[in-house]
Amino acid sequence: MIFVLIALLAACSSSPSKTADSLPEQLAGGLARQQVSEIPAGEVPEIVRNLGYRAGQRTLYTGPREVAVTLYEMSNTSGAFELAQKWKPEPGRLYFHQGTYFVVLESAAAEQKELNAMAGELEKALSGK
């Protein structure tokens, strides 16, 4: 009987968030991960909360330039996809979704092609490939 209860609890629980381990320590161009912090609940944008926010982190990469990466883990892939459809583009920012993740890269110093290359690396890391 206890095994049935454990199996039921395991099936009903959601998998633990892995945002802290999701982003690489290094990115091309000599960028190294320096600061990682969880996003306080009060700082999560309303649109993110409304689409199934689960967890998030901010990561700062430094080197020849600084790049801030905000990673939102959503409760499902459709929430991450919808964020990519609704997020407003801004100069110096690039965003994408990969699975249940929605990611925003920001840099005042990096060129768009550099942000694109970094996004490719991060997307690959998040997909587990």
Image: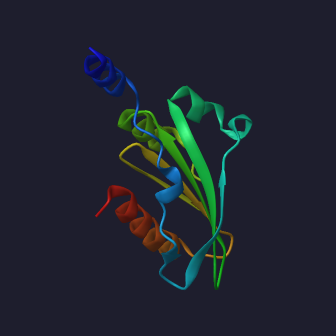
Name which residue lies at 51% across and 38% down: 86
Q: Residue 128 in the image: state x and y as whole percent.
A: 32, 60
Q: Residue 31 in the image: state x and y as whole percent.
A: 57, 79
Specify whether residue 91 is in view: no
Q: Residue most toward the right?
A: 42
Tell me if residue 100 comes above or below residue 34 in the rendering: above
| On-image quarter of the N terminus | top left
Q: Residue 100 in the image: state x and y as whole percent.
A: 40, 42
Q: Nearer the viewer, residue 17 or 109?
A: 17
Name which residue lies at 71% across and 41% down: 40
| On-image quarter of the C terminus | bottom left
Residue 65 quadrant: bottom right
Tell me if residue 52 comes above or below residue 68 in the rendering: above
Q: How is the image coloured?
A: rainbow
Specify whether residue 73 is in view: yes
Judge left or right: residue 27 versus residue 93: left
Q: Residue most toward the front?
A: 1
Q: Nearer the viewer, residue 32 or 120?
A: 32
Residue 66 quadrant: bottom right
Q: Nearer the viewer, residue 33 or 90?
A: 33
Tell me if residue 113 comes above or below residue 101 in the rendering: below
Q: Residue most toward the top?
A: 1
Count how many numbered circles sit on residues in the image.
Answer: 0
Name which residue lies at 37% across and 38% down: 77
Residue 3 quadrant: top left
Name which residue lies at 64% across and 85% down: 64
Tell me if residue 84 comes above or below residue 54 in the rendering: below
Judge left or right: residue 98 versus residue 84: left
